[in-house]
Amino acid sequence: MTAAPLAPPRPRADGRQHLTLDADGVTLSARLARPAEGPPRATVVALHGAGMSAGYFDGPAHPETSLLAVAAELGFTAVAVDRPGYGMSSARLPHGQGVAAQAATLAAALRDLVARHETGAGVFLMGHSFGSKTALRIAADGTVPGLLGLDLSGCGAEYVVPPAAPATRAAGWKLNWGPLRLYPPGTFRSSARIVTPAPERELADAAHWPSAFAALAERVRVPVRFTFAEHEAWWRHDRQALARLRGRLVAAPRVLIDRQPEAGHNISLGWAARAYHLRALGFAEECLRRWPAGTERRP
């Protein structure tokens, strides 16, 4: 059976667009922002965390926090994708997918993106929390042509606490948000539009991440930057844990580890979002110039 053609991007009043991507027969929804003038320098593809949606990267509470907006301002195309089990794919994949299956699905979607849209010099992946795990697996598998690098937040290699549902609401707040002052007024009301239950296969797979990371890290051959928020509570980010994390990425041409002051786990929803996004896009610029797509570290 021939699949029906996917709809072209639909313009929004703010200049950004909604679009669909074909992931080998699975339709994924996404948000798109293009530069106002000229072709893009490259394309930033952002993968949200568990229990969120693509709107995480689009400034639901304050326009200053939007990755899509600042990326387009700086000449990049930006695409925030609803990962498998979210958005338009939730009916097809009601239980979601684990890291490996998500990586395969998203890699197919990114190949569709590259085939149908102008992406500039290549694709730069940004991931938050569970989306970072999928981004790392995509890089390790080497299934996306033109991959420039990775910028990851809300994810490490060793948990502080097991990745199960927090025992209390207060514990969940500390893990996911941190101090209230870190966020623009109205954040928690506006975020209701982007919060959604995390699919069960995704949650079940999260417990296996430390061993999964150990197995895939040596196959990542693009530059990687990790950012740990000042109030990050899910992940170990002490000196010893970060040394172990860095030491496993033996084939990456560069591994950079940064800290973001005045930020919690949901870093792109807080006042620190613009500073973080600018640093991430600066790293994308470095990757674009120093490690053109396809460059690998040689033994």
Image (tube, rainbow, N blue to C red):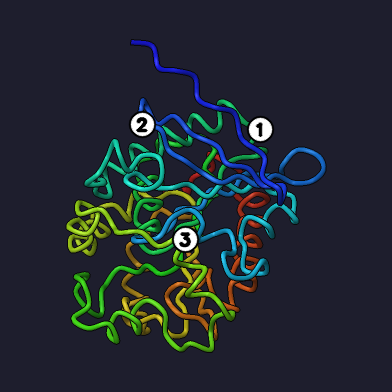
Disc 2 to disc 1, how far (Cα)? 22 Å
The residue to which callout 3 is attached is 193
Give amino acid for label 3: Arg
Q: Which mark is in front, 2 or 1?
A: 2
Asked whether 243 or 179 is in front, the reply is: 179
Q: From the viewer's perspective, is residue 93 above or below residue 278?
A: above
Give amino acid for label 1: Glu
User: What's the residue at 40%, 17% (across, down)?
Assistant: 3
User: What's the residue at 52%, 43% (across, down)?
Assistant: 147
Residue 277 % position (x, y): 61, 66
First in sequence: mark 2 or mark 1?
A: 2
Q: From the viewer's perspective, is residue 237 above or below residue 201?
A: below
Q: Which mark is in front, 3 or 2?
A: 3
Residue 216 % position (x, y): 29, 52
First in sequence: mark 1 or mark 3?
A: 1
Residue 63 % position (x, y): 67, 66
Disc 1 to disc 3, how far (Cα)? 30 Å
Asked whether 46 or 259 is in front, the reply is: 46
Residue 169 falls in which quadrant of the image? bottom left
The residue to which callout 1 is attached is 118
The residue to which callout 2 is attached is 26
Label 3: state its secondary structure: helix
Give amino acid for label 2: Val
Label 1: state its secondary structure: loop
Left or right of residue 42, residue 88 in this image: left
Label 2: state its secondary structure: strand
Asked whether 196 or 22 is in front, the reply is: 196
Whether the residues at callouts 3 and 2 have beta carbons within 8 Å, the answer is no
Determine if residue 223 is in view: no
Left or right of residue 193, residue 289 in this image: right
